[in-house]
Amino acid sequence: MEHKEILHRCFRCGYCKLPGNYVDINCPAYLSFRFETYSPGGRMWLLKAWLDDEIQVSDRFARIMFSCATCGNCVEHCAFPEFRDKILLAFNAGKEAILDTGKVPPGVRDYLTRMQNYGNPYGKSQQKRANWAENLNIDAYSDQEYLFYAGDVGSYDPRGQEIAKSVAELLQKLGVSIGILKQDETSDGNDVNSMGETELFDELAQKNIKIFKEKGVKKIITLSPHSFNAFKNDYISLNENTESFFQVFHYSQILAFCKDNLKNIQGSIQQTVTVHDPCYLGRHNNDYFSIRMVLSAIPGIKIAEMDRNQKNALCCGGGGGNFFTNILSESEERSARVRVLEAVQTGSSILVTSCPLCTIMLEDAAKSENLENTIVVKELSELIMN
Amino acid sequence: MELIIKELKDIVGSQYVSAEPEELFFYSRDQGTMPPVEPDAVVMPKTTKEVSKIMLLANKSKTPVIPMGGGLVLSGLSRALKGGIILDLKRMNQIISVNPHSRYAILEGGASQGMLQSYLKKNFPQLKHSMPDAPPIATLAGNICIHGSGHLSVLGGFHSDMLNGMEVVLPTGEIIRTGSCSVSKDWISKAPLPDLSGLFLGWSGTTGIVTKLAIKLFPNYRFNDLLIFVCEDADIMPDVISRLTSTQIAEDMTPWMTPKPYWAKGFLHINISYGAHTKKELIFKRNLLQSSVRFYIDKKEAGFLPLPPPQKKRFLKIPSPDLVRFADIRKGGGFEYVGAIMAIEHFAKAYHAGLEIAEKYDVSYSLGARIIGAGHAMMFFFAYAFNRADKEDIKRAQKALESTNKAALDIGGIPWKAEEPAQKQIISKMDPETFDFIKRIRMMLDPNDIMNPGNWEK
Amino acid sequence: MNKINFDPNLCAKCETTDCLMKCQYIDFANVEMAKKERIKINSGKDSHVLHDCLTCYACQEYCPNNNNPFYYLVERQEEMGILPAPRPILTEQLRMMDFKGRIKKQQMNLPVINMCTFPMLVGCIRGNLFKNISTFVGTDIFCNIMWLHFAKNSVIQERVPKAIDNIMKNFLADQDKKEMICFHDECYGTYTSVAKAYNINIPFKPIHLFDYINTRLDELSDSIKPINQIIAYQRPCSNRLIPETDKILDQIFEKIGAQRVQRIYDRENALCCGGVIRAHQRDEIADDLLNRNIDDMVNIEAKYCVFNCPFCMATMGQEVAEKGIMPILVSDLVQVALGE
């Protein structure tokens, strides 16, 4: 197993459970289930025990491993700088090894089966991939400046489709030249990769790289930070010629570039908002500023930060495939619920985020906490467009 | 056990009970060198009532119960030596209230050091509590119950000295309170009542489970600074400590003697932390501290390191992650230490004993101390790192720790949070009538011998 | 040990004894009293000056005869076992700054800049100002001049040749031109002033950072947007050994619109930052120097406090910032003007 050399170095000190300011539990899996085994330190020790034949693979062990939301809080806050960058990589390798044994939680199994059979986690036809763009004036990508990549959630989830439409329309209003791949778009594979299914990820990535090359794609704008992360960090090792690789942006970064024009689209919004940092933009890719630059450019908006913001942000719990597998949702103390309650404490009327998965997770949580009259969850482009 | 597990699930909810191999593996051990012992189950209560019900069940079935906080004790005190249930208290992690006038906080038994620090910074920035250098997930109750110490120990003594009162579930399931909170709504002190808190402090979880506690808070200074004193002669350290503590300025004093970084090898350092409300006051305090040891400075035997402000930040961080990072110096994630509470005049003896043992067993070491009170005692620590993946390395560390426990006792110190073999060494030195008395108290409180059995036994 | 270039007869004939009379930290009632102490020092006798000296290097600059009075004083301190700092502090520093043997030969392209022991400042070597520059850093090339503060000339003499050897072998051997820019003032002082005083052979040409920047500013003149701000300059002790470079700094400031307004504690009257004085366990003196110096900067309404020496900046930067003056290195200020 790759990265096994770091497993025994974990001191299970628990720094990985908390944010840098120690406000509260910040590991979504540990927060949901509270056994030490569900913490990053727990996974490290269990993986080592498994490799040493002290424990066997079981349903529970598999569930513990796949409950990881890959939010990166452990990487950010682990006290050991020499190996903390490899923590999630070790977990991925562990998941890959577990997949090989066949002991897979049902949610994971179903997700990967749908990905294998349909190329998307919804089990829907590839032909319907671009349905979200119906009635929108977006051409197929030919030589526009940017390829706009909607991803799985943006393409197939009804709420995700709304967000994809909103972002695409906003970009066009700002004069950004975009085209889409329509039915030629393939899943980015980020969540497949984070579940350790590296072979399938390679397959998906190679498909995407091939089509990007064929179409002459030079710049990509992604809807989802998950896609952004995969293209920016994981595709690079798969492309033969890294010098001619495409540039990838998350849409919030493009909005930040165009921030001076935002007030022409949305006048003043006299609201106090709080920001939820998506993990795959924030901790994984160090971009905490694009969303804040955009919000600061909108007249009237005041930002009230949550105690856990930026590199201390509490993950919504949707990463690591949990958005689809629902492992974390089995618990009442799931992080999305804790997060919306935290947002309410800032006194803000709006909780803004720039990720379709985070938006859906947090909206659901606000509903289940009956907070819809207290705080509204808004995706960034929808805040501007509405 | 299956029936017991079913009843536990009825008490706390099925998702908070586990007898699965994964939990049994993890909770059977800690980061130290003590061998693993598997419990029968792990349970995580949320309320005092649930804890009480669990104790009633445990008594009925004579099932051992082992309370566990952060699980960071390192000496294996939360292992189920005779099987039974590990009670992981960290779901009971609420900060109940803070009284800024009488300066205390009431917390649940599983509340963590880090969360209290964060809470105070945000809501009561004029107050702080004494934090140990343990990781921030360590629980306040756990640390107090083992007589821990921390960053305000020169000011306030052991953390157990900073306790105002507790809510405790007895081994037999009753819920009692100690201190003023047993009479009044104010949790201000143990006095003037019979000090029942003592029945639960230093007993390694064998007399009851702390479900709530009140701890003293202290003024949080706006300006904080650090001096690092350095000398080469361990024999002068007691006098230096005496002089520095006589100023009654420092909040924390921690001597440290490590072979790494290599430039520090052979030198004895003392980190002295202090604070003030104004810069003028800070400088005044600094001058007083420096004058107190001018005798040694003028002889050029010792002095204070010239630390530019950017370099001080690392030492002023509370808790310091450097302590935890020591575990990785052999790239092995293992570390355990003997922390012996002893008289300050034994400093040189303890230091030389530590060096000798480290050399004899070829272990990576760090020696140091935390001064308690106005130079009333010290917790002298002998820390050894080991590579968890190397069995020989673990053995060497174990031997070093055994020798250290013996050496500490020979010097007149008493290892705190002693691991089970060290407990026996302590008992062998203890006044027999005192030990008998301990046994009688335990029997009275815990007639079925279910509370963390296997500890403090001959 | 190389013998110092020092002639006691020059001191005997000196009418002003400026080295002591101009000292900012030790007072003498008159020239005669100062001369008396000078003669004592020169004849190997004990003098309170040997104990009271703050080691600010200023007398090197004040001496009208270029007779190396400070280097000579330090030699006397060492001979007589007068330690400015406590022994454990000195020993730890000696160990900390010793050669680590981690140096590796690196391909360099001219120009080359020596970053001394400031790896944290390698990031400052960026942008057009430092285009195409190669850097090297580490204790294995440490200039060792700091031992002047600790009465250890012998260590300078012992370690400097090895540092030179390391530089030549690992970084300059393959270069056509054996020259390097010294990012830190002290390095330049070592390879010019100290080398001259002790006849140490320097096989390369040291270039002062100010010279490099001054030349570069002419090349980048189109990019300069003058900052037009009042600045206070913290002149470090090391610059006392190479006072000729102060004029070049003035040229730099003029080119970038930094107004080095006259203040009490600048140029010949510059105050020590106090960092080393704290190592000498004289914190109250260091506090006084800091307060006077910063008050002086506040009085001229300086927007920036410009540092030449990273150690001065580490020592004073926080205090300066608390008074609303931005601490900044010379090179960083220049880059502000260049829009970098």
Image (cartoon, coloured by chain):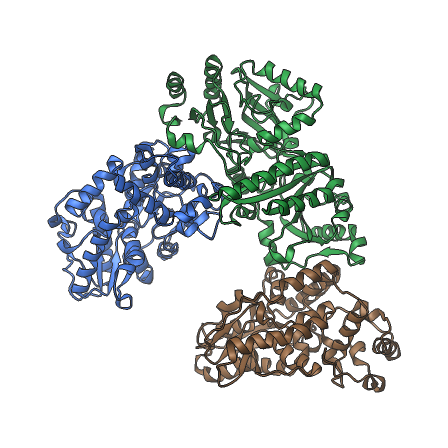
The chain assigned the colour blue in the figure is A
Q: Give the total number of marks visible in the rendering.
A: 0
Is residue A231 visible to us here? yes
Percent position of residue B422, x then y: 61, 31
Report whether B34 appears left or right of B202: left
The hue of chain B in the figure is: green
Q: In which quarter of the image is residue C24?
A: bottom right
Q: In the image shown, does A36 or A377 lie closer to the viewer?
A: A36
Report whether C20 appears left or right of A374: right
The chain assigned the colour brown in the figure is C
Q: In the image shown, does A71 or A282 lie closer to the viewer?
A: A71
At a point 68% along the width and 24% down the height, the residue shown is B191
Q: Quadrant of residue B120?
A: top right
Is residue A328 visible to us here? no
Percent position of residue B50, x then y: 45, 21
At a point 62% along the width and 40% down the height, the residue shown is B150
Rendered view: C100 above or below B106: below
Q: In the image shown, does B392 or A126 lie closer to the viewer?
A: B392
Rendered view: B407 above or below A310: above
Q: In which quarter of the image is the N terminus of chain B?
A: top left
Report whether C162 appears left or right of B6: right
Q: In which quarter of the image is the C terminus of chain B?
A: top right
Rendered view: C233 above or below B146: below
Percent position of residue C253, x then y: 56, 78
Q: In the image shown, does A242 or C91 lie closer to the viewer?
A: C91
Q: Residue furthest left?
A: A127
Q: In which quarter of the image is residue A63?
A: top left
Percent position of residue B221, x then y: 64, 46
